């Protein structure tokens, strides 16, 4: 097997592990933000949740691009 396949598989698996490990923390931050709408701490928590969503989206796009490039490599 070639290196591109291993990079793709590793990137996807590591991304899933990180996603699952951080999911519960992000859910609790969203619950805290909803419960305390006027709290000043909400701004930093909201930013961290937004950046988590952006990074998960970027991880998904890169994963799809890696998988596509691997399939095109053998096509």
Image: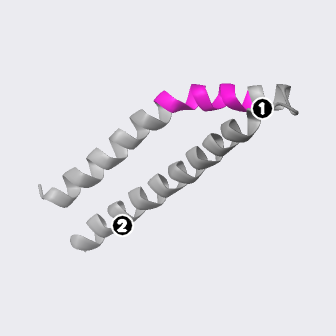
Q: Nearer the viewer, residue 10 or 24?
A: 24
Image quarter where the N terminus lies is bottom left
Residue drawn 40% across the image and 56% down it: 63
Q: Which residues are magenta?
A: 21-31
Q: Would you identify the image quadrant in which residue 44 lies?
A: top right
Image quarter where the C terminus lies is bottom left
Q: Image height check: is 46 above or below 28?
A: below
Find out whether residue 25 is within the magenta segment. Answer: yes
Return the disc, 2 or 1, that comes first in the chain's sequence: 1
Find out whether residue 69 is within the magenta segment. Answer: no
Residue 62: horizontal and vertical position, in percent? 41, 60
Residue sitting at the far right: 38
Q: Image height check: is 30 above or below 69?
A: above
Label 2 and label 1: CA atoms lie apart by 38 Å
Which residue position is annotated with label 2? 68
> Could you say which disc has been placed on residue 33 in the image?
1
Q: Would you identify the image quadrant in which residue 36 lies?
A: top right
Residue drawn 58% across the image and 48% down it: 51
Q: Image height check: is 59 above or below 26?
A: below
> Could you tell me which secondary element the residue under label 1 belongs to?
helix
Crowding around mark 2 (Cα neighbors within 10 Å: few <14, some 14 to 19, many 20+) is: few
């Amino acid at each position: 097997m070639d290196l591109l396949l291993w990079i793709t598989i590793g990137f996807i698996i590591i991304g899933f592990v990180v996603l699952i490990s951080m999911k519960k923390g992000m859910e609790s931050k969203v619950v805290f933000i909803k419960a305390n709408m006027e709290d000043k701490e909400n701004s930093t928590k909201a930013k961290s949740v937004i950046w988590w969503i952006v990074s998960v989206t970027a991880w998904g796009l890169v994963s799809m691009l890696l998988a596509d490039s691997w399939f095109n490599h053998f096509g």
